[in-house]
Amino acid sequence: MRIDVVSIFPEYLAALDLSLIGKARRDNLLDLNVHDLRDYTHDRHRKVDDTPYGGGAGMVMKPEPWGAALNRIAAESPAAGPLGEKPILIVPAPAGAVFDQAMAYELAEAQHLTFACGRYEGIDERVLEHAAESFDVRPVSIGDYVLNGGEVAVLAMVEAIGRLIPGVIGNPESLVEESHSDGLLEYPVYTKPGSWQGREVPEVLLSGNHAKIARFRRNKQLERTAARRPDLIVELDASTLNRHDRDT
Ligand code: 6GU
């Protein structure tokens, strides 16, 4: 997969050199390119913002540098096709559709993702209209709170998407039983020692009875989800619950 990120703080994205995502880049599973928006300015002050038409607080990102950066990325996109196929442009913003595991799975299938990190009060709206000629434009939020810019949201989204690319995670089985993969939160986990600070590992986990262990874990998932995320229980598809779950 190719990923391009445009930001006025490219250093924020340095964390994507680390850990699993950094290894995926070195293994050529992920071709990640970070661009400094100021490289697409032409004035001495490398100005990227200006005051808002209509008045109001704060500054708005100017359209020209964004147009130049996105035109360049669209022209180089491996996903742009002769039949009008468009690469995806994700615009992180609190006003976007909320990012979740289903969206991460969908985006992990893409050949090319571009992230446009806004700062200040946002990017001139005409940039997104113009970009829609060459990209499938998607405003996306990572939750109902406000960040100062898109960079931290991009770190979260690239990590969530990148780990789903085949080959990035050594043992793909670890993707099956994690939180949100089946609409429920993950069960609690334990390791050695069996007794610590007077607290014992639940006995069933030492029993060797795999059916009993599976039932114990499933019950913990249901209990936890009901306690911490009742909204997820409401959303559960009846078909994801099994006969035994109804007895819980
Ligand atoms: Cl994606 N961007 C910004 N700036 N703030 C946010 C966000 C994104 N998601 C939640 N808050």
Image (spheres, rainbow, N blue to C red):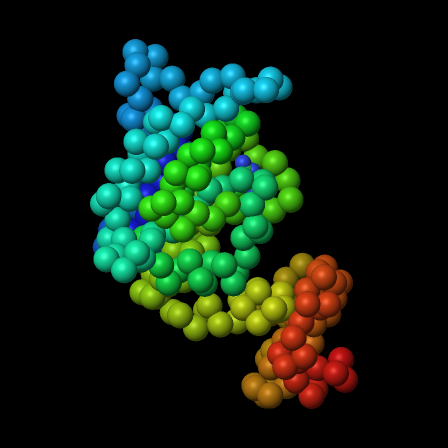
Q: Position of residue 48 (x, y in %)?
A: 40, 21
Question: With 155 as the anchor, is 83 left or right in this view?
Answer: left
Q: Quadrant of residue 110?
A: bottom left
Quarter in which the C terminus is drawn: bottom right
Residue 153 in percent (x, y) is at 50, 42
Residue sitting nearer the eye, 37 or 10: 37
Q: Is residue 151 above or below residue 201?
A: above
Q: Is residue 224 visible?
A: no
From the viewer's perspective, is residue 210 above or below residue 4? below
Residue 227 found in image quarter: bottom right
Give the quarter of the image for residue 188.
bottom right
Quarter, ligand 1: top right
Residue 213 percent location from the top left of the image: 61, 82
What residue sits 47% from the left and 18% below the top?
Answer: 50
Tell me which residue sits at (51%, 30%) in the image: 122
Taking the image as drawn, is residue 242 in sight?
A: yes
